[in-house]
Image (cartoon, rainbow, N blue to C red):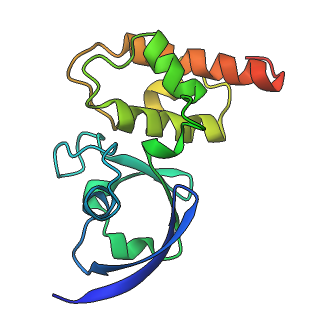
């Protein structure tokens, strides 16, 4: 089994780790780094539970090789909280009951984070499109969409922008 040294940034920290050529990013994050917030769902790129941001773009870590992330920046759900405080997006999911059972939540939040980074005041249609690759088996998505809208409004209020 061939291994290689991979240099990348995970949650703001530079890393240099040996990974086998066939190690999935999901396994690298969970098993080598202990970042278990990223969930293993379908293992086939269909459910979105494993969504992380790679250079700010949502990607499915269950179908991404860790070795392909050389020189890239990876953000997981663990990167959002600061000093033990939930981010506005995480808080909104909690307050608006967007979490339901919680299994899909990390992937949903990371997909929503990518949306809010590129579009701070998204429409409902933009939210639905951004989350279209993420499946929730517990809800009709209403609370999830409300959660993203609440976070967008809170972030707009914090920066003084109109929501």
The residue shown at (64%, 41%) is 118
Image location (x, y in percent) of residue 149 = 57, 17
Between 105 and 47, the residue placed more toward the observer is 105
On screen, residue 20 above or below 153? below
Image location (x, y in percent) of residue 82 = 60, 38
Q: Quadrant of residue 139?
A: top left
The residue shown at (28%, 55%) is 30
On screen, residue 21 above or below 24? below
Relative to residue 83, is residue 53 drawn left or right? Answer: left
The residue shown at (27%, 31%) is 135
Relative to residue 107, is residue 152 drawn left or right? Answer: right
User: In the rendered image, which quarter contains the N terminus?
Assistant: bottom left
Which residue is most to the front? 83
Image location (x, y in percent) of residue 51 = 37, 46
Give the number of callouts: 0
Q: Quadrant of residue 106?
A: top left
On screen, residue 5 above or below 118? below
The residue shown at (43%, 71%) is 69
Does residue 132 appear in the picture of this structure? Answer: no
Q: Quadrant of residue 42?
A: top left
Does residue 85 appear in the picture of this structure? Answer: yes
Relative to residue 49, is residue 158 drawn left or right? Answer: right
User: In the rendered image, which quarter contains the C terminus?
Assistant: top right
Relative to residue 149, is residue 26 drawn left or right? Answer: left
Between 46 and 28, the residue placed more toward the observer is 28
């Amino acid at each position: 089994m061939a291994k290689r040294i991979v240099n990348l940034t995970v949650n703001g920290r530079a890393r240099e780790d040996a990974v086998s050529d066939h190690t999935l990013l999901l396994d690298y994050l969970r098993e080598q780094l202990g970042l278990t917030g990223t969930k293993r769902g379908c293992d086939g790129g269909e459910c979105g539970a494993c969504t992380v941001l790679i250079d700010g773009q949502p990607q499915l870590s269950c179908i991404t090789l860790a070795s392909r992330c050389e020189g890239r920046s990876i953000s997981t759900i663990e990167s959002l909280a600061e000093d033990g405080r939930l981010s506005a997006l995480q808080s909104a999911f909690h307050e608006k009951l967007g979490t339901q059972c919680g299994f899909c939540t990390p992937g949903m939040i990371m997909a929503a984070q990518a949306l809010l980074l590129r579009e701070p005041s998204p429409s409902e249609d933009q939210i639905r499109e951004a989350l279209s690759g993420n499946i929730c088996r517990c809800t009709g998505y209403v609370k999830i969409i409300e959660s993203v809208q609440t976070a967008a409004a809170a972030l707009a209020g914090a920066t003084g922008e109109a929501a």
